[in-house]
Image (cartoon, rainbow, N blue to C red):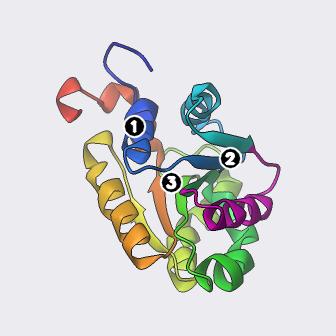
Amino acid sequence: MSTTTPTPSELLYRKVRAHGIDFFVSVPCSLLGGVINLLEADRDVVYTPVTREEEGMGILTGAYLAGRRPAIVMQNSGYGTIVNAICSLVGYYRIPTVMLVSHRGSEGEKIEAQVPMGEAVQAVMEASGVRCATVPHPDQLGRVDEGIEWALAEERPVAFLFPFSYWKVADYTPEHR
């Protein structure tokens, strides 16, 4: 991590790691590239890139059962592929999985096909038993603290949506540490 003003990716990563999250899987995403780079460099966590979100959910479940605190790093467009795993595995067996989710289809999206799922994802998450919070700016990372604490206490999955606005470094100032 840099010794200068931390990036939004570094701030997010520090926040998640402060809660003992130590096992990660990810699906490629350009918005989450900074977080993925941090995962690749951190020798204190187990990190595995996966090709599909549902593959990641199975791996994370096994990691939790082996005593780890798991998280997935993914785009919201992939949430539709894991609804069954969320309902019949993670939710049913009370696996407190943390989902760090880039919110494709949010304001600033350039790919029109991403918009329908972007508009639907929060309702789909909530309907499938996942507590969901949007984090539009690094100064609102307290929502991550609250959500992870809830997930660990209740043994339930939690998702954090990070729209394009979160990643705009120009909006970030040092007082938001």
As drawn, is 84 to the left or to the right of 76? right
Q: Residues within 10 Å of mark 2 (few under 14, many from 20)?
A: many
CB under 8 Å between discs 3 and 1: no
CB under 8 Å between discs 2 and 3: no
In the image, residue 23 lies at what x, y percent?
60, 49
Three-letter amino acid code of the residue under disc 2:
Ser
Give, as a single range, the part of the protein colored magenta. Answer: 49-69
- Residue in the image at 59% along x and 34% along y: 39
Read off the residue under disc 2: 26
Read off the residue under disc 3: 106
- Residue in the image at 44% along x and 49% along y: 20
**Can you tell which quarter of the image residue 84 is in?**
bottom right
Three-letter amino acid code of the residue under disc 1:
Arg
Please tell me which residue lies in front, 99 or 40: 40
**Can you tell which quarter of the image residue 3 is in?**
top left
User: Relative to residue 109, is residue 56 depicted above or below?
Assistant: below
Q: Residues within 10 Å of mark 3 (few under 14, many from 20)?
A: some
In the image, residue 12 lies at what x, y percent?
41, 40
Read off the residue under disc 1: 14
- CA distance separating discs 2 and 3: 20 Å
Please tell me which residue lies in front, 1 or 170: 1
User: Relative to residue 156, is residue 141 depicted above or below?
Assistant: above
In the image, residue 10 lies at what x, y percent?
43, 31
Please tell me which residue lies in front, 32 or 144: 144
Three-letter amino acid code of the residue under disc 3:
Ser
Farthest-out residue, left:
175
Q: Quadrant of the C terminus?
A: top left
Among numbered discs 2 and 3, the one appearing first in the sequence? 2
Q: Quadrant of the N terminus?
A: top left
